[in-house]
Amino acid sequence: PFLQAVLDDPDFTAGRITTSFIETHPELLTARAPGDRGTKLLTYLADVTVNQPHGPAPVVLDPASKLPPLDLDVPAPDGTRQQLLAQGPEAFAAALRAQDRVAVTDTTFRDAHQSLLATRVRTRDLLAAAGHVARTTPELWSVEAWGGATYDVALRFLAEDPWERLAAMRQAVPNICLQMLLRGRNTVGYTPYPTEVTDAFVQEAADTGIDVFRIFDALNDVEQMRPAIEAVRATGTTVAEVALCYTGDLSDPGERLYTLDYYLGLAERIVEAGAHVLAIKDMAGLLRAPAARRLVTALRSEFDLPVHLHTHDTAGGQLATLTAAIESGVDAVDAASAALAGTTSQPPLSALVSATDHAERETGLSLAAVNALEPYWEAVRRVYAPFESGLPSPTGRVYRHEIPGGQLSNLRQQAIALGLGEKFEQIEDTYAAANDILGNVVKVTPSSKVVGDLALHLVAVGADPAEFEAEPQRFDVPDSVVGFLNGELGDPPGGWPEPFRSRALEGRTWKRPAEELTDEQAAGLGLRGEAASPATRRRTLNELLFPGPTKDYRASCEAYGDVSVLPTLEYLYGLRQGEEHEVELEPGVRLLLGVQAVGEPDERGYRTVMCTLNGQLRPISVRDRS
Ligand code: BTN
Ligand code: 3PY
Ligand code: ZN
């Protein structure tokens, strides 16, 4: 019908067709497209309703009903973003170092759900609270809302374009710095990319809304971070926060590798490489209070940079660590809304605010404002129940196995998928053994994946770690481990484990990751020939970083249209029979969608789902895969 309308249009028939044809005939789109969009969305919803990919809905409550009333037409007050724009990154960092209050980063929008809910929280559920955060906690130093695993998961599982999330968050939070996690040369992926990719990625992220880049390398190799640091500095307007990844226990007299001297030496190279802010990234939650005191004190006395502490509360003791760090002068700390805090996530924001209120270094955040958003995030968490990590409580075992927060939850799910769910303690022990075999490495994405892959593999084939270490030639070795031992991720701080490494690599081939872009990729990034549009640059980055998931994302858009407009209950669990569900396609364009009845499967396994679209019956045929 749309094509027919175009063909029938007098301008078209008369040949008066230009690129602006659609722009001058908007009625064609608004009049016809919602029907088409509606049918596509119904096709998706009918499929989910029949196949229940995540089981039945755990709740029926719409989380948005838990948001406190607030006038979103009132502009958000100025915050750190305006300060950064006015002062530039150097002076902005110096002001952080000079202030008495402890600055706070809210990680609810990224690391918290990455660590508790497999990164599954969708853009619309983040956006629903973003305007509240901007207006009720404008004293935050930053909101961490992008990077890490969110990019991959958006394309792979959520049928969302990660760039659209960032742009929307920027609009919703115009006043607080937006922060992302950048994996050095691996950007938001798992293997290193050419420097041009880092440059293009950083520039695009800065243009789209990132103010603070937290840059780390999985082996604390500064050379692997240097291109990213330089790319951030080259923007001229954004902050390079460079992390030392913390592992081991620097207070332990038996610690030979990850000592205070090791961290100070690393920090010196980070400062020399051009960092604006120094971060301590304690991804597994191993930084104990006494060690935090020594590390923060030493870093602040040796260097002029502000120090920002990030930790995970896996063992349950990290509010003590934050308090010790604050008393030792740490300039900023990370926390998450209590409903998405604790265990593998960050310590709770409300506990942090209450622990520092009415004291010398109080955060300036309102405890009431922070508390007011907890019911919302709690309701969101219930909606995403199937993605819960399954870690019911804190665990002190992390001090032994050192599995990062984000991985601990994932590894449990991977173990269950491999039929090893009942052997999780053995996987933890084997992870520790795999770490020793690989040379006691820093474990954080992607090195943590290498150690995890080896551990799962050894348990799955029933191999004894000691035998594997002695004679790795006799065993299969996961690809990621072969890549790691070939130096794909850089050089580990403790050097290479020999003779294990040579033996393990004997006779095994490995394909070095591409060091050059193809002509097509370079053109897509605007590096050769004509400048590329933002849409082309973003599409090229998506394809370059995640070719498979990007293809799936496109296929989903083709088949179902933009499913990001669907409320999460419907998106994950389908339609409740007999109820009409309202979906807003865009401001002012609403659809009423429903399922009346689901038929019996035919001989090919297809069911007819009797749907309604704005009250009209629409039968949709769905293959029953359940
Ligand atoms: C998620 O995993 O987070 C969402 C999964 C949604 C799966 C749906 S079911 C309809 C459509 N057809 C598929 O094969 N997958 C999607
Ligand atoms: C990531 O790389 O996604 C992390 O969160 C590492 O801690
Ligand atoms: Zn983290």
Image: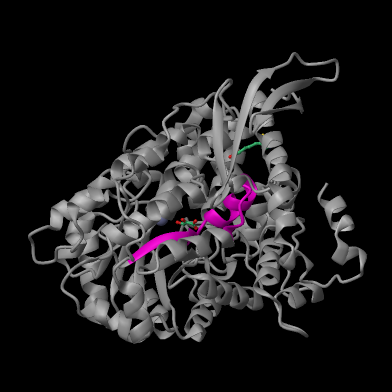
Lateral position of residue 245 relative to residue 387, left or right: left
- The residue lying toward the viewer, choosing from 129 and 33, is 33
Q: Is residue 259 visible?
A: no
Which quadrant contains ligand 1? top right
**Vertical relation: 171 (above or below) 29:** below
- Image position of 595 with respect to 204: above or below: above
Compared to residue 103, the image places residue 451 above or below, namely above
The residue lying toward the viewer, choosing from 539 and 471, is: 539
Residue 462 x %, y %? 61, 32
Which residue in the rendered view is the most extreme toward the right? 14
Give residue 209's position: percent from left, percent from top.
48, 70
Q: Residue at x 68, y 46 (%)?
A: 34
Query: Is residue 94 shown in magenta?
Result: no
Task: Name the residue at the front extreme.
Answer: 10
Give the residues in magenta: 142-162
* Quarter the C terminus occupies: top right
Q: Is residue 102 left or right of residue 212?
A: left
Residue at 44% in and 59% down: 145
Q: Where is residue 246? Give x, y as percent.
A: 37, 61
- The answer to whether 606 appears left or right of 95 in the picture is right
The residue under the point 42% across, 61% down is 172
Using the rendered view, name the quadrant where residue 109 is placed: bottom left
Evaluate whether residue 472 shows in this view.
yes
